[in-house]
Image: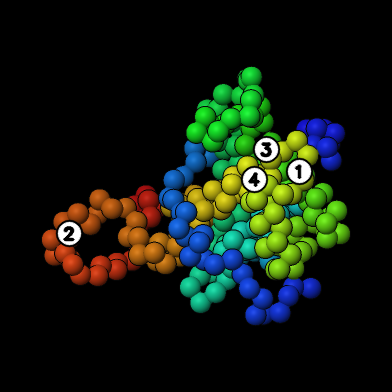
């Protein structure tokens, strides 16, 4: 996509971060469409995003991975309940989704006409999801540099929170892109990465399922409903991969 189409030291440890409760209230466990088998490109995860094993990415560039990592860690900061969003595998999940059929817009109608419409009317862009996020990241980083002289991933914790709030409220200038729409798409993708089945790359070690008490495949526990009626049931969650 051409650029002209876009018009375009961390804070102290006690710096306030977005409440996790607000993030969890909007959470869902939907997973996007299947993953593409081919590797189109590779880029190393930023240092802050690496787990114990070196990891490569399918389609995200280094700046895109750094942006998603910063967003995921701002929305899901590390605390006594979970690791950071990046360490939970959110960036890996996003990379796989954008590399697959969903990222390529396989089931989206994109031929237009494209009009400003309410959210319930669905996707109203000619861009594929991969193109949309790539364009949004370029525009968001350009706005961040204009505002704070740094790309989004180089901002302090406080500045990242301010930037996300501006995006959410539609106050960030992203050129032809709606900052509110971009924020909502980011939030949805991060939530999916945090709560989806770990086999898709996110929710590493089933951390979010343990956090909310979700047992995994629900069909496994139907025979125990009577036994545990009005009692707490906290088994080790089971992923689809546990049965493959």
Q: Please say if the residues under marks 2 and 3 sit with CB atoms less than 8 Å apart.
A: no
Q: Which residue is mark 4?
A: 180
- Of badges 4 and 3, the one in the foreground is 4
- Residue 20 visible in rendering: yes
Q: Secondary structure at mark 4?
A: helix
Q: Taking 173 as reference, is 126 left or right?
A: left
Q: Position of residue 200 (x, y in %)?
A: 49, 49
Q: How is the image coloured?
A: rainbow
Residue at x 32% of width, y 60% of height: 215
Q: Taking 217 as reference, is 99 left or right?
A: right
Local crowd size for mark 3, using a 10 Å CA cut-off: few (<14), some (14–19), many (≥20) = some
Which comes before the other along the chain, label 4 or label 2? 4
Which comes before the other along the chain, label 1 or label 4? 1
Q: Which residue is mark 2?
A: 225
**Nearer to the camera, 240 or 207:** 207
Labels in figure, total: 4
Q: Which residue is mark 1?
A: 174
């Amino acid at each position: 996509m051409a650029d002209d189409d876009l018009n375009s030291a961390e804070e102290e440890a006690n710096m306030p971060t977005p409440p996790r409760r607000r993030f969890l209230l909007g959470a869902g466990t939907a997973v996007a469409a299947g993953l593409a088998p081919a590797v189109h490109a590779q880029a190393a995860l930023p240092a802050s995003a690496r787990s114990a094993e070196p990891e490569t990415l399918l389609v995200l560039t280094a700046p895109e991975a750094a942006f998603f990592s910063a967003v995921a860690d701002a929305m899901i900061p590390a605390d006594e309940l979970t690791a950071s969003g990046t360490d939970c595998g959110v960036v890996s999940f996003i990379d796989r989704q954008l590399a697959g059929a969903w990222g390529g817009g396989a089931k989206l109608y994109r031929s237009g006409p494209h009009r400003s419409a309410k959210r319930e009317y669905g996707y109203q862009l000619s861009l594929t999801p991969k193109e949309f996020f790539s364009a949004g990241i370029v525009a968001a980083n350009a706005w961040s540099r204009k505002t704070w002289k740094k790309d989004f991933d180089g901002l302090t914790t406080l500045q990242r929170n301010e930037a996300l709030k501006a995006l959410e409220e539609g106050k960030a200038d992203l050129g032809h892109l709606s900052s509110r729409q971009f924020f909502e798409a980011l939030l949805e993708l991060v939530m999916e990465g945090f709560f989806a089945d770990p086999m898709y790359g996110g929710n590493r070690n089933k951390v979010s399922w343990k956090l909310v008490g979700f047992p995994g495949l629900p069909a496994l526990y139907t025979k125990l409903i009577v036994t545990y009626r009005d009692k707490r049931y906290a088994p080790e969650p089971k992923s689809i991969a546990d049965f493959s």
